[in-house]
């Protein structure tokens, strides 16, 4: 319900139960509901899509996991967005056999030639895709790796859906469509879950056109948009590193640098204390977080929604 098929027939698409890797522990298989496209004959030049008949989206955050099981000919799968009534759309897709990824404009459903990027094929075959479209800029991650932000020039809002080649047998699962939060917020949430030394993090920056620092992203979402701690301004302006030891946490404020090595934000990091852990060790752990944030966020534009 709520979807329509294009470039093929609706019966090509079915919802089934399948075993997939757990998001918490990829070595454990769990049963999930999956969208299945069963590839047909060798018809790689046909591009079936299943389009969500919801509103037209200009901005969105899309997450999905997909795997190509087999088929004939050139096997490929992915997602489309900003789809128009004439079947023109933006396409993000993968050809695993060629270890290629492409993000391109398709006019009236035709797949044009264009530059492609190398990818690393995951051992379990599952691709975890995150796409964020905000202010006509598309960015995201594939299996945790950030890809460059690209502009969407003269492409109006449109529908979102699943895409495959006609020959391809593939599965989609764990799909979620929401309005976007900042790219920085996504990273803060991920780091807070995976770094065992952290209690919480605040990423502080000065919004374009403003003069005072504010919390751009935080482990606690209620802090986002609030005025920043006073010590953060010195870190943003001068690179000052602040260290303070409390009974229940170690606080370190460190600069976060963009791709050109310039300070774009301050990371206020709260670490778990330890009786045998030195100040140098705490600073090293905080520095690793700040460096990771800078490396993945890259530009000031990704700090705010």
Image: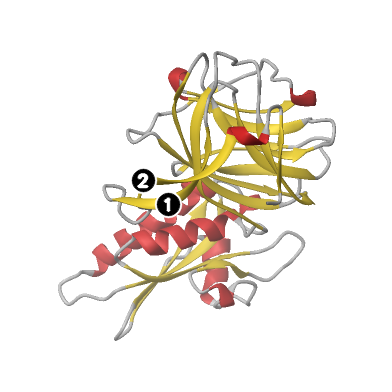
Q: Quick check: 50 above or below 299?
A: above
- Residue at image position (21%, 69%) is 278
Work out whether residue 274 or residue 193 is closer to the camera in this orientation and state it. Answer: 193
Give neighbour class at mark 2: few <14, some 14-19, many 20+ (Cα, 10 Å).
few
Residue extending farthest left = 276
- Residue at image position (68%, 71%) is 212
Does the residue at mark 1 contact the one at mark 2 (Cβ under 8 Å)?
Answer: yes
Q: Quadrant of the C terminus?
A: bottom right
Please provide percent x and percent y for residue 247: 29, 86
Residue 162 appears in the figure = yes
Work out whether residue 47 or residue 296 is closer to the camera in this orientation and state it. Answer: 47
- Residue at image position (61%, 43%) is 139
Please provide percent x and percent y for residue 272: 29, 74
Residue position for label 2: 19
Compute the Cα span from label 1 to label 2. 6 Å
Work out whether residue 59 or residue 217 is closer to the camera in this orientation and state it. Answer: 59
Please provide percent x and percent y for residue 33: 47, 51
Residue 296 has which mark? none
Q: Quick check: 278 above or below 33?
A: below
Q: Secondary structure at mark 2?
A: strand
Q: Quadrant of residue 47?
A: top right
Please provide percent x and percent y for residue 172: 51, 42
Residue extending farthest bottom = 247
**Image position of 242 (left or right of 45):** left
Residue position for label 1: 32
Q: Quadrant of residue 213?
A: bottom right
Q: Quadrant of residue 159?
A: top right
Residue 255 appears in the figure = no
Q: Secondary structure at mark 1?
A: strand
């Amino acid at each position: 319900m709520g979807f329509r098929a294009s470039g093929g027939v609706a019966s090509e698409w079915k919802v089934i139960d399948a075993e997939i890797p757990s998001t918490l522990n990829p070595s454990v298989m769990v049963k999930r509901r999956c969208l299945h496209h069963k590839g047909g004959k060798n018809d790689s030049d046909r591009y079936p899509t299943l389009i969500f008949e919801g509103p037209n989206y200009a901005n969105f955050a899309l997450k999905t996991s997909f795997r190509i099981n087999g088929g004939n000919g050139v096997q490929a799968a992915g997602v489309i967005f900003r789809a128009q009534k004439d079947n023109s759309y933006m396409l993000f897709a993968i050809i695993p056999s060629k270890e290629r990824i492409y993000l391109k404009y398709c006019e009236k459903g035709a797949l044009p030639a264009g530059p492609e990027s190398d990818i690393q094929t995951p051992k379990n075959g599952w691709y975890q895709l995150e796409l964020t479209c905000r202010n006509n800029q598309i960015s995201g991650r594939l299996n945790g790796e950030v890809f460059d932000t690209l502009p969407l020039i003269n492409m109006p809002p449109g529908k979102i859906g699943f895409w495959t080649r006609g020959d391809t047998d593939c599965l989609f699962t764990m799909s979620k469509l929401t309005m976007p939060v900042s790219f920085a917020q996504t990273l803060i949430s991920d780091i807070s879950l995976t770094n065992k030394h952290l209690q919480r993090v605040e990423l502080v920056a000065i919004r374009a056109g403003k003069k005072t620092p504010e919390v751009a992203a935080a482990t606690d979402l209620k802090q986002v948009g609030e005025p920043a701690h006073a010590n953060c301004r010195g870190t943003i302006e001068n690179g000052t590193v602040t260290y303070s030891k409390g009974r229940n946490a170690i606080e370190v404020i460190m600069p976060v640098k963009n791709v050109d090595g310039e300070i774009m934000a301050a990371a206020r990091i709260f670490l778990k204390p330890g009786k045998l852990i030195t100040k140098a060790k705490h600073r090293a752990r905080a520095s690793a977080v700040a460096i990771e944030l800078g490396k993945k966020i890259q530009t000031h534009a990704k700090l705010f929604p």
